[in-house]
Amino acid sequence: MHKGKVYFIGAGPSNIGLLTLRGKELIEEADCIVYDRLIDNRILDFAKSTAELVYLGKENIGGGLLQKEINETIVKKALEGKNVARVKGGDSFVFGRGGEEIQALNEHGILFEMVPGVSSCIAVPQYAGIPVTHRGVSNSFHVFTGHLADDRKELDFEVIAKLDGTIIFLMGIKNVKSIMANLIKFGKSEDTPVAIIEKGATENQRVSVGTVATIAEIAKKEKIVPPAIIIIGDVVNLREEFKFLGMI
């Protein structure tokens, strides 16, 4: 049987305007669309009427079993001869587990193509008026997963705390207290500015600003929920000058 091809499409951070032209083109042509919870659902309106839509979203929980189901689904649909659009929020290779899905395809000799997406690690701060780099303020930015496991060490906070550039944690709101405590423990100044951007780049975007010492309590008080991104560094202080949307 003829095998289909899988197209990994980064759809950006829940904002249809940030979908690339190539991504739109492939979604329009796809026989099957496998998508997650972080896309702008208006993107699905581009699908042809005969396209099969398959929702597989992790709902911000550990994704081991679901990731297995995702891998099996895209393999199954491609083996049925369907061209599959695997549509992910952000970019497939920025904590998107796209590599694991490619490995599953390779085991079956299924062809694939990558379509880069606008990553939330730069787009969301930008929509909040926060540049991840700025001359004289920060000449680098560093992106980490904030989804920490209790049973193993995933991040070296002793190194992270000493970084001079902007520090960004994706998927870290549930662990914000632990993240800040570890940064302080290893020498990060308690006065370092921090912003948490909830539902970034959408009409429901909300920005909360504090410091390494105060942001965990602010997040609790403001009842911030995922998806949310944590930005740490002096670039946060540029927000009032650079923000361009009244709603934020």
Image (cartoon, rainbow, N blue to C red):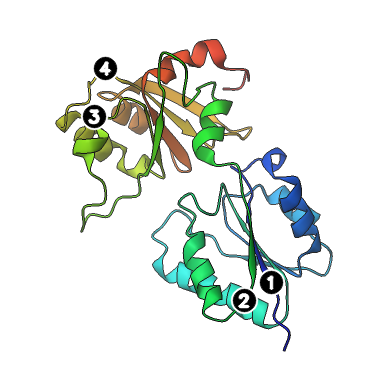
The quarter of the picture where the C terminus appears is: top right
Residue at image point 60% right, 41% down: 118
SS at circle 1: loop
Q: Nearer the viewer, mark 2 or mark 4?
A: 2
| Residue that numbered label 3 is attached to | 162
Q: Quadrant of the N terminus?
A: bottom right
Q: Mark 2–mark 1 contact, CB under 8 Å?
A: yes
Q: How far apart are the alpha carbons under marks 4 and 1? A: 51 Å
**Label 3 crowd bin: few (<14), some (14–19), many (20+), radius 10 Å:** few
Circle 2: residue type: Ile
Q: Give percent across and percent down for residue 155.
A: 26, 46
Foreground tag (4 vs 1): 1
Of the two numbered discs 1 and 3 on the same chain, state the one appearing first in sequence.
1
> Residue 236: x and y, percent?
43, 19
Residue 110: give its label.
Answer: 2
Left or right of 87 in this view: 102: left
Residue 33 at x, y percent in the picture: 69, 64
Q: Quickly name the residue at label 1.
A: 5
The earlier-in-sequence mark between 2 and 4 is 2
Which of the labelled discs sits on residue 191, or is there none?
4
Q: In which quarter of the image is residue 110?
A: bottom right
